[in-house]
Image (tube, grey):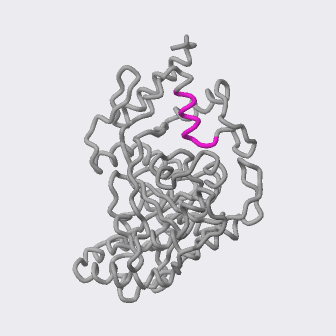
Amino acid sequence: MPKLASKDKTLRSAIRRSLRAQGFHVADDRVSFRQKRDKRSIRKRHEHAVEKRILLAENSLACDEEKLLAYIASGNEVDPIQIKPKLVQVEPDTIESKLFRYACLHWSIPVSEGYGRRLRFLIFDESNDRLIGLFALGDPVYAIKARDEWIGWDSKAKAKRLYHVMDAYVLGAVPPYSRLLAGKLVALAAASNEVRRVFSKRYAGRKSVIAGKKREPHLVLVTTTSALGRSSVYNRVKYKNRLVFQSVGFTGGWGEFHFSDGVYEDLSEFAKAHCTPTEKKEKWGNGFRSRRELVQKVLYKLGFPKAMLKHGIQRELFIAPLAINARRFLRGEDNHVRYRRLPFNKAVEFWRTRWLLPRAERDDSFRDFDPEEWRLWKKPKHE
């Protein structure tokens, strides 16, 4: 390990303390998850980071919590027979944008802002103007072994056609609709015709940040990873007889950690002074493509081995091919896309028959949900 200055040694110590606080065991510059890798333990590992994000959001969202909570249904407001889902694209600086951020604060793991291209959507119940669920698509991680093996592309085709892949970095339903398997509906919506068209319209004629070239946008593959190991939401998501999301394996258990309490800010300052981004782009702000790259670069520069980044928590990877010839197109073997049809209104009807009504018949626990359970900050006192 290179000789480090005193302040750099202090940063190394802060990194170790932060990792231990997250539930990791740190010894000989190696990290292991010291708890069981069940869903409960993984949630606990993220508790500190989730609480930190809620605290940071308080100044901008707490004053609107009453308005935002009004979009969360109580169980007695939901009539399964009358549910009428509506897909809404989220635009910046709107109440929908605030609602999206607010809902994400209730996820059991910290939700990133995504990076690169981003599209956000909400699904409302028009029968009562309440929120059913949400999802967001962003640029995919460049190297995911299971995805790349499924596609079967070489490095040249990947560099050229990864542009046509997006990752659902947020995807899920909110209560009480989550208890009615609305997560299945949200997953279908992410693969719908309407989302493809929004993607095409948004990015038509635009230059990509990395390549600096104009490309005709064809969204042919949506990927997503389970937050807590194996997934029950994406498992067996079908439209009629077709499997929409299919499992292709697990991530390798590598990734960045959730540094907070000023540690990430110190990492960022260190990166600016001592680390070189993989490919410098002014539009990326500090020059790093993502939080993950920044953390990786800093840990390596501080003398931590690459094995430090293998925390061992694997996530199940799912893919949704939106075209019959998705793999051939992504490999560069076809130049024309043959899309599968999945209109949102048809997805709604299929979900209603296949999942919603059968679940409502055998389980009425959704009726017990009170939106007050979602309150994050103290209710303001009336003068």
Residue 186: percent from the left, percent from the top?
A: 45, 70
Residue 273 drawn at (x, y percent): 67, 25
Q: Residue at x 56, y 51 (%)?
A: 153
Q: Is residue 20 visible?
A: yes
Residue range in magenta is 289-299
Could you say which is closer to the camera, residue 239 or residue 86?
A: 239
Numbered disc total: 0
Of residue 355 and residue 337, the one placed in the foreground of this image is 337
Q: Residue at x 55, y 10 (%)?
A: 3
Q: Does the stretch in magenta take in 190? A: no
* Residue 294 lies in the magenta stretch: yes
As drawn, 143 above or below 74: above
State left or right for residue 47 relative to residue 305: left
Give above or below for 53 relative to 379: above
Residue found 47% across the figure and 50% down from its top: 149
Q: Where is residue 263 in the image (x, y as percent from the top left)?
A: 52, 32
* Residue farthest along the left direction in this orientation: 362
Question: Residue extending furthest top?
Answer: 3
